[in-house]
Amino acid sequence: MAYPSRPALRALLGASALALSVIAGPVLAETVFTKPLVDFAGRVSAGGVDRAPVFKGGKAVIEGQNLIPGQTVTLMRGSKALNAEPITVDAEGGFSFALDIDAEAETGLQPIVVITENPASAEVVELKISPEVPVAGAEKFAVASEPVVRGLYQVKFSEAANAAFVTSAVGRPPVKEAKLVKINPETLKIEAEATPGAAPARPDGSDGGLFAVYGVDVDEANGNVWVTNTRQDTAAVYKQSDLSLVKQFEPGAVPHARDVVVDEANGRAYASATGTPEIKVFDTKTLEPLEPITIKSQIRGEEFSTMALDIDEPGGKLVTVSLSTPEAAVVDLASGEVKVIALPGAKAASGVAYDPQEGLIFVASQATDNLLIVKAETGEVLHDVAVGAGPLNVAFEPVGRLAYVANRGAGTITVVSPAGEIVANLDAGSLPNQLRADGKGNVWAVNKSRGENDEAGDRIWRITPATE
């Protein structure tokens, strides 16, 4: 067999390479592996039009911000593209895509893959399709409601003062409109109100606004009202009688303070520091901070984030729930022992209530639109109840033995039995925010408005089972 000379071999190889380049050139130019990004650029969100809930047969909108101008976007649910043609990101780095939800859609958190090209990246966003629970059962309750002031957050009834205390704050920092309000329990009219004092300047030197008030509880033993100042990461104490300030704790005392509950029997106040695993503790007589309670998540690599609080004073139990992990916790206040309970089926849990008679924990979760009823002793989830869009808080009323859930997105209060049955679903106007039982058969609730002229918002509600 004859072999070509070196010059001939070079010529042959050159011709072959040229032929391959001609053949392979177009194939390589059409590779699926185009230039990628190291990380997804920008942010994509999926939700309802004007932040409304998304229901079966309704509409949703998928929006992007801070993407790369000129990128193209394809939205995938499973193997199906939701947009017939790629969406081009505009010069400001944004896009908006309207999506019709079919009537057969399943409720829950639907994963949507956002795929970009030029350059390439991908991210998964969740579109929440909420259950629609019809309004029903209003005839089973006597409901009274009156407007209060703008920006209502929480309410707590005081038997000693024979009044309901309500907190309010309007807008984002610097908050310049906030009030602590005392309300007559019969007429639901304002008896007194106080404006919090000025807060110190913010870290950047700008106006600190007011020590706006958010969470609230009453200390009957000392005649005080405890509030949280979420924007300044702290808490304050006011007199029940005239709403005069007793003590303003320094900023930073309770990081992102949310709820506060008072244990009168042991002279303690507990405040949840959302975003941290801590519950801050204060002496209600000396008004001095004590050693905090720390809750360790049982999920590897995760951190418990305390949210709502409920207390069983006779039983010495403090109950909370985590926003960041699917967990609740029960604190034995005598021994300090902390029991963490897994909550399968919960995401972004924010509300919690406790029934000491049956040892039940009620958990309201914003992202999963449900109420879990859990046996505290075993951690067993007894019932998973779809209550409507955006359940934010829950209260257990021990006389009628019913749980009341404030569904912020749906605009309803769902009444649920310990057996997981929906007894009623009450119209609660705009954005129901928080509610508390008074131990006498009543539930007190407040909602927020959607704007200055929203007559269905910023109201207090008194809900009582109707007598036959």
Image (cartoon, rainbow, N blue to C red):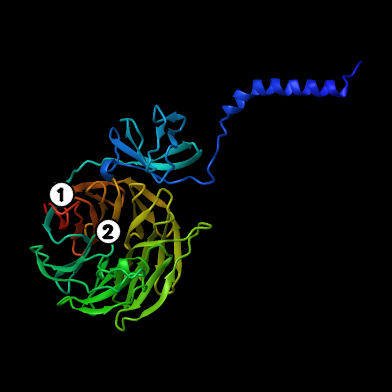
Looking at the picture, how far across and down is residue 250, in whole percent? 33, 77
Looking at the picture, how far across and down is residue 220, in whole percent? 22, 76
Residue drawn at (47%, 37%), measured in percent from left and top?
116
Query: From the viewer's perspective, is 293 left or right of 458?
Result: right
The secondary structure type at the circle numbered 1 is: helix
Question: Please, which residue is most extreme toward the front here?
Answer: 7
Q: Nearer the viewer, residue 219 or 53?
A: 53
| Dot 2 amino acid type | Phe
Q: Quadrant of residue 186?
A: bottom left
- Specify the label residue 396 is tagged with: 2
Question: Please, which residue is most extreme toward the bottom here?
Answer: 286
Mark 2 neighbour density, 10 Å: few (under 14) some (14–19) many (20 or more): many
Looking at the picture, how far across and down is residue 41, in whole percent? 46, 45
Question: Please, which residue is most extreme toward the right here?
Answer: 1
Residue drawn at (22%, 48%), measured in percent from left and top?
411
Disc 1 or 2, which lies upstream in sequence? 1
Separation of residues labelled 1 and 2 (CA atoms):
17 Å
Residue drawn at (56%, 31%), measured in percent from left and top?
32
Query: From the viewer's perspective, is 68 left or right of 403?
Result: right
Q: Quadrant of residue 65?
A: top left
Looking at the picture, how far across and down is residue 444, in whole percent? 19, 60
The image shows residue 455, relative to residue 84, as above or below, that is below
Q: Nearer the viewer, residue 372 or 164?
A: 164
Q: Quadrant of the N terminus?
A: top right
The image shows residue 58, relative to residue 354, as above or below, that is above
Residue beneath disc 1: 140
| Dot 1 amino acid type | Lys
Q: Nearer the viewer, residue 143 or 203?
A: 203
Mark 1 neighbour density, 10 Å: few (under 14) some (14–19) many (20 or more): some
Q: Quadrant of residue 233?
A: bottom left
